[in-house]
Each structure stands twice: as C-alpha cells, then as structure tokens.
Image (cartoon, rainbow, N blue to C red):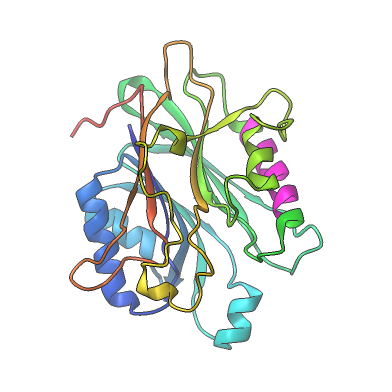
C-alpha cells in the first residue's frame, strides 16, 4: 500500500498552475491513500474533489476556516480551507475532531478520520491533520497531539491493520510534540499507543526536508530546511499488516516550471494491502 501526505498551500501563489502540477505528481506516484492539508474550497468547487475526479478516487473532506494570520495578511477573501483524504478504495466511515486551541489563537484546526475498505478485505483506519503553525507554539501542539492521539485510539478498530496518521505537524522530529505523539522516546500521549515515524525507513542519506529552501515559494521564509510533514503508523498487525517498507519525498521539484506546493510530499510504502490496478 502506498501512502502519501501533502500540504497543498491553499490558493497561494500561482494556484491554477500549481494544481496541475499537484495532479501530475499524484498521477506519477499512484498513491493508494492520500492525506491532504490546506485544501481550498470555493464556489462549490473543492480541490480534493477535483483531484479525486481526475484520478478516479474516492474522497472525504473536513472543512475548517481561514486561519487568523491568513486573514490579517489577505483581508476578507472568499473560500474555505480544510483537510481531505483521497482513496483508491471505498471510504466506509468518516469522523472529524476539532483540535484544542490550548491558549493559542482562535484557529479551527481539525483531524479527519476515514476508514478505508482496502484490497484483500483490509480495513485501514486513516487520519490526516494540520497542527498549529507558530514557531513558538510547541505547547499548543502538544495539547493538539494529545487530542489527536485520543481520537486515533478511539477509532483504530479491532482489525489487524494499524492506524495511519498523516499530516503537517509544523514541528521537527526531535520536538516535544512529535516525540509525544510517537510514544517511543517519551511516555505516549495515550498509554500503550505507539506510532512509528515512517521516515526512519527512508534510504540512508535521502533528503528529508519537506520545508525545503530550494523551493522558490519559500524565498525569504525558510529560516532553515526542516522535516515537518509525517506519515505515522501504529505497531504492525500479527501478520505484519502495516509494516513500513519505505519512505521518501515526492513533489520536490517543478512540473512544467511550477512546484506543486510550498511543501514537498512524503510517500510511505506499507505491507498488507495492494492496489488492484
């Protein structure tokens, strides 16, 4: 099973050309299940819906609100933003959890759950989210990952396939919030629940940065290169279901002159289910 996560940078920059680049990357990568963040919706059109139609995939959507610091910069602009899931297989159940503000700005941040009815009868509990972004906001993100971990624990289900959690955590791998969510180095956010960072199965020496100064959309914004986007997977099932086989970046360059987003995507290969086509 091929998992992909990608923050799509809403409608910033040359968004019409960028969405074509996003589509081209997804067509090339052929992911089975995709977690998307900063997905725009406007006038009845939804970027995730358009991608799903073009790719022949199922989709689910969790609407949010334009973030306060976006409104300060952009003014009163039309449209919405949210998280989404695309899947080659049917999505049989969904739920949305609003993450806590925890003393931070009054943002609407959510986690989206989609139960994917995958190949071979496997049911994959899949999640995607987008955490608070302020550079000094670790305390807020810690509370958000605690809520996220509880949301995951409540919906992981009885099946052998572990939960898969994707998203833009806006935090480095060594940060308190990422270590807390993983539960390997520190006490887990939910007792007994361990989530494994798929990147540790990347090829040695592979470029890890999803916030990459080589991206022209980050000119003047990237203080340093960083890995802030993740695929996390629970402990594999008794038959090895969900075991992480590989991890790498995607969308780390232009398509016909345009990068798809200000983030690169992360792709992870998991054992236990395979696309039929």
Q: Is residue 151 visible?
A: no
Main secondary structure of the magenta stretch: helix
Q: Is residue 97 left or right of residue 260?
A: right
Q: On the image, which quarter does residue 218 sit in? A: bottom left
Which residue is depicted at the point 58% across and 64% down?
A: 64
Query: Where is residue 259 drawn, in percent x and y?
Result: 30, 68
Which residue is depicted at the point 50% across and 19% down?
A: 159
Task: Name the quarter where the C terminus is drawn.
Answer: top left
Q: Is residue 12 left or right of residue 130?
A: left
Residue that lies at the very extreme toward the front in this rendered image: 205
Residue 90: say if magenta.
no
Q: Is residue 162 visible?
A: yes
Which residue is depicted at the point 74% across and 56% down?
A: 140
Query: Eyeballing the image, is 36 above or below 94?
Result: below
Q: Which residues are magenta?
A: 141-153
Query: Eyeballing the image, is 98 above or below 200?
Result: below
Of the pair 44 and 224, the residue shown nearer to us: 224
């Amino acid at each position: 099973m091929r998992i992909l996560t990608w923050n799509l940078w809403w409608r910033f920059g040359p968004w019409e050309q960028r969405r074509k680049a996003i589509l081209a990357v997804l067509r090339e990568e052929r992911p089975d299940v995709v977690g998307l963040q900063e997905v725009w919706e406007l006038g009845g059109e939804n970027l995730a819906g358009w991608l799903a139609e073009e790719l022949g995939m199922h989709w689910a959507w969790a609407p949010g609100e334009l973030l306060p610091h976006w409104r300060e910069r952009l003014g009163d602009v039309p449209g919405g933003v949210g998280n989404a899931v695309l899947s080659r297989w049917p999505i049989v159940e969904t739920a949305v959890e609003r993450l806590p503000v925890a003393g931070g700005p009054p943002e609407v941040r959510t986690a989206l759950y989609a139960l994917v009815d995958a190949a071979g009868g496997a049911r994959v509990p899949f999640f995607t989210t987008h955490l608070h972004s302020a550079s000094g906001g670790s305390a807020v993100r810690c509370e958000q990952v605690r809520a996220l971990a509880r949301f995951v624990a409540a919906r992981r289900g009885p099946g052998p396939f572990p939960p898969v959690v994707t998203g833009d955590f806006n935090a480095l791998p060594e940060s308190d919030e990422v270590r807390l969510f993983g539960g390997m180095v520190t006490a887990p956010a939910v007792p007994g629940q361990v989530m494994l960072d798929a990147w540790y199965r990347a090829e040695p020496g592979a470029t890890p940065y999803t916030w990459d100064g080589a991206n022209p959309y980050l000119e003047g914004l990237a203080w340093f290169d960083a890995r802030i986007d993740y695929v996390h997977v629970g402990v594999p099932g008794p038959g090895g279901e969900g075991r992480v086989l590989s991890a790498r970046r995607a969308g780390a360059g232009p398509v016909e002159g345009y990068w798809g987003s200000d983030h690169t995507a992360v792709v992870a290969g998991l054992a236990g289910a395979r696309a039929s086509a």
